[in-house]
Image: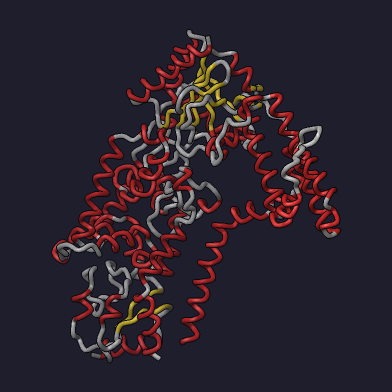
Amino acid sequence: MDKRKNRISLLLSRFRGCIQAGAALLTNIHLPNFLKGGIYQGKGKYVCVPGLNCYSCPAASGACPIGAFQAVAGTSKFRFSYYITGFLILLGVLLGRFICGFLCPFGWLQDLLHKIPGPKLSTKKLKPLTYLKYVILLLTVVILPAAVVNEVGMGDPFFCKYICPQGVLEGAIPLSLVNTGIRSALGVLFTRKLLILMAVAVSAILFYRPFCKWICPLGAFYALMNKVSLLEIKVDEHKCVSCGKCARICKMDVDITKFPDHTECIRCGECISACPTDAVRFHYGFGTMEHKKQRKDKQNE
Amino acid sequence: MNKKISKLLTVMLAIVLALGLTACSKKEEAKNSPTGENSDIEALLSAEPENSREAAELYQKLMKKEEDVLTGNMELWEKVFLLVDKDNITVGDDNNYGSFLLKIIEDGKDKFSEAELKLLKAGAEQIKGLEEKLMALEEKYPDCTGAKGEGSSIDADSAGMSGNGSEMQGFPEFQGKDLDGNDVNSSELFSGNTVTVVNFWFTTCKPCVGELGDLDALNNDLAQKGGAVVGINAFTLDGDQDAIRAAKEILSKKGASYKNIWFASDSDAGKFTSGLYAFPTTYVVDKNGAIIGQPIVGAITAAEQAEKLNALIDQALESSK
């Protein structure tokens, strides 16, 4: 039984690149808009896509959850978006940071950039920086758009306006290429965010997924949801020989044997492929009898 | 478990394929349908262009239809073309390609089956009708034949944002109302002002709301020159009462007293508005209803943008004289 379950896990992690490409395409299905220079404004934009994908990308099929949340929080009528939060909790419970690993287009981009040869640096010592993304989530997405308002009660989407490199990459650059009006409207904000984008791109070559680890507010939300997500990674203690290989190859600096629901784990499944004894696998659903037994054993010890 | 994997893969593949289909479906439709569609040929035939730009557009559409009629049954038509006596071509008294084709078909009717003849004759009749319309158009608007090259897209123009061409573009006409319910129609509005600055905004757009005060000041300035600022709030289209109330509230909070208008979202101006995706966007329109230069995208509060706007206003005042 276990062996066969492990095969699904292996398949998933082996075809992760394809799934990421497919997800990026589905998230940005209106490709002809890149040439026409408009953005799709139909009903699809009433819902959010799971990953970080700018609403203003000409091809985008849905709205960005982080952008949408700020847009609602920034209006004079509302201070908090229950719809988006509920949507994110649902996705978080269903998949957790699996979304980062498999469905997010910006995560995929960083994966691809990391394949460029060059010095690869460890991020283990930079662990405190991983808490930065929670600060960014709280401040620029939740608090500032609702709190810093003009005389009619409207706030700015702080994250989109001052930080988000995905917005520059998917929105500002393609739109300004084909539209003179938008090109002439580019100002200092664009330059600043372009620098952020370039910094993220360069450091994505050196480090693995720097944006996801340190900056992404959406990743921060899903990180917390990892704790309660139905999609988990399980380590079979009977099979595990404690070789430590999984911890060594993990690019997100997680020791899956000790912390299977770690906030930083993006469920990429590399530990599953690496495990010599097939002890690691994806598990979906509530805890099984077997795991309860394991837990009991642990308590008895 | 093996079954489960294949099931999962099948479902995922099916989803990808289904979504792939939806992405292409429109184009396919467009490719397959037009040949025998009497109804849209009739629509084209009854269309009456109001200016030479529309005439040129219609001309291109008619030409396209004619081509479609022929390409729809290419093999059959090629047979017809083979029947033409190359040494002795007479297009006919009325100079109509359609009646010329009808004559050829009539002369060689024993070479086709009953069904083929019916198809060919129907096609030739369609072409005759189209040709008549084309000739009428040429007579009325002599320059409509070559105004637009092939491949120039109508969508880009109607979207309003992509007007890269240097040709003068008219602001779409509308029959609307101001936020107090008084009728406003575009031709009266534009012809009554030496220059009209049209500002597109919506209620929850912070930079849009941020420039309302400046626009009001501009309106007061322009009043001395016989011009005016007009706001179009995208939320208020179709006269949505809640949206109008919200817009009025913001306008009064910002002390903006210039005219704001709405019109039906399915009107030309409504479609023009929904084609915009950057807000605020500001157009400058002259007395004749023509858009001057490129629209200003983004708030006009920045010095650079204000300068651009003033240059456009001067240009409009000049062309309104």
- The residue closer to the viewer here, A137 or B16, is B16
Q: Quadrant of residue A76?
A: top left
Answer above or below: position of B298 versus A246. Answer: above
Answer above or below: position of B134 versus A21. Answer: above
- The reply to whether residue B239 is in sight is no
Residue B104 in picture, x, y percent from top left: 80, 46
Q: Quadrant of residue A259?
A: bottom left
Q: Quadrant of residue B95?
A: top right
Residue B321 in picture, x, y percent from top left: 53, 9
Residue B87 in picture, x, y percent from top left: 73, 42
On screen, residue B226 versus residue B81, left or right, reads: left
For image coordinates 49% across by 72% down, the residue present is B12
For image coordinates 20% across by 61% down, the residue present is A207
- The residue closer to the viewer here, A35 or B278, is A35
Residue B145 in picture, x, y percent from top left: 63, 31
Q: Quadrant of the C terminus of chain A?
A: bottom left
For image coordinates 27% across by 91% down, the residue present is A238
Q: How many marks?
A: 0
On screen, residue A73 versus residue A209, left or right, reads: right
Q: Quadrant of the N terminus of chain A?
A: bottom left
- The reply to whether residue A174 is in sight is yes
* Residue situated furthest front in the rendering: B87
